[in-house]
Image (tube, helix red, strand yellow):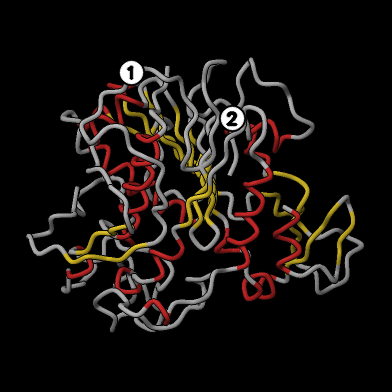
Amino acid sequence: MDQFTTKTIHQLPSTSRDICCTLCFIFVLISSIVVLNLGSSSKSLPLFRFDHFFPRKPAIFHHKPPLRPCDYSHGQWVRVHHKNPTQLYDENCPFLDPGFRCRRNGRKNVEYLKWRWQPHDCYVPRFNASDFLERSRNGRIVFAGDSMGRNQWESLLCMLAQAVSNKSAIFEENGSPITKHKGFLSIKFQDYNLTVQYYRTPFIVVLGRRPITAPPQVKVIVKVDQLHWRSQQWKGANVIVFNTGHWWNRHKIAKMGCYFQEGGTVNMTMDTMEGFTRNGTWDDGGVCDAITEPEKDPKKLKLESWNNQYIGNMTKEMNHGKWKVRLLNITYLTGFRKDGHPSKYREPGTSPVAPQDCSHWCLPGVPDTWNHILYAQLLSMEFRTE
């Protein structure tokens, strides 16, 4: 998770500090982190991921003001019996990857759309796309990370687009198709002068080629002490959402022949946990098409991942001066929802013998809840760009 800087922000010793200075939010979804830089002036308040950084202007609340601080990470999934009442958009949204359009890909069961997250002792406001857009006017929201972050990015685009009558006023600034999976995509909401961007940076830090002098088993290296070079493009954003935990697991690291490098030296003994801390899970493959409703027994969920534990401790240390950092842990609430994966209903053309997708999420679906919580946090911080 990282951030943005403004002219009034003192330059920090490294790029990572440059980025982490504004409104910050930290999203944890199997170690997903979200950082929001809300507000780009000296009057803005810095916050971390699912926090906010913004001037305290009078806010237009369509909900119960003010929203008190709340732990949205623990609660239960509640079935809603109306016809798709939680669905804010459908698969006709032009910003969805083919692989996330599960019903169009053959899924008949739609029960996964009929659940809402209810935190313990918390009020969750109804998502108001018009209000979200107005609060973000003349701003920039950045998603940086892997395909889990892309899942959430596409969800937010579709949720916000419902408040725009002229859909032609929403477009990719460089003319790139939504199916582009390398580099970055930048969607412009012209009527609000708002851009919502996605940068593909699976490790957040640099993934590089093996040094010539490295042992033969080294195929690629992760430079744990260097932020991805695209981090320079995140500066000045009002909100940054980081997500990377999906790649920081032993299986992926070993399969890639990946080792960690620090200070120009490849460390052949540094394990995944140590590499992550220098810088859960839906990454085990498997079969999930037979699951048609949320898990009801919390005891069957995995224990809190070490990624999340580390991030939680880290954010506490980052609260100083103008920095206000909060961690939003969505791993727990998402762990109940194996019914929301694409499973065998993958993009057209996928081989019948290809592994099921038990990592990503159908859209509409679970990522919409992540964005509901993001919006709730912004409201509680009275977020508004200038």
Q: Earlier in the sequence, mark 2 or mark 1?
A: 2
Mark 2 surroundings: few (<14), some (14-19) or many (≥20) residues within 10 A: many
Measured as percent of width and height from the top left, residue 295 is found at 32, 77
The answer to whether marks 2 and 1 mark residues whose Cβ atoms lie closer than 8 Å is no
Residue in the picture at 20% in, 72% down = 106
Q: Is residue 249 left or right of residue 348?
A: right
Mark 1 surroundings: few (<14), some (14-19) or many (≥20) residues within 10 A: few
Measured as percent of width and height from the top left, residue 138 is found at 39, 20
Q: Quadrant of the N terminus?
A: top right
Q: Is residue 79 shown above or below 37?
A: below
Helix, strand or loop at label 1? It is loop
Q: Amino acid at mark 2?
A: Phe
Q: Amino acid at mark 1?
A: Pro
Q: Quadrant of residue 98?
A: bottom left
Instruction: Work out whether residue 104 can be spotted.
Output: no
Q: Is residue 336 shown above or below 377?
A: below
Q: Is residue 256 shown above or below 321?
A: below
Which of discs 2 and 1 lies nearer the camera? The answer is: 1
The residue wearing badge 2 is: 4
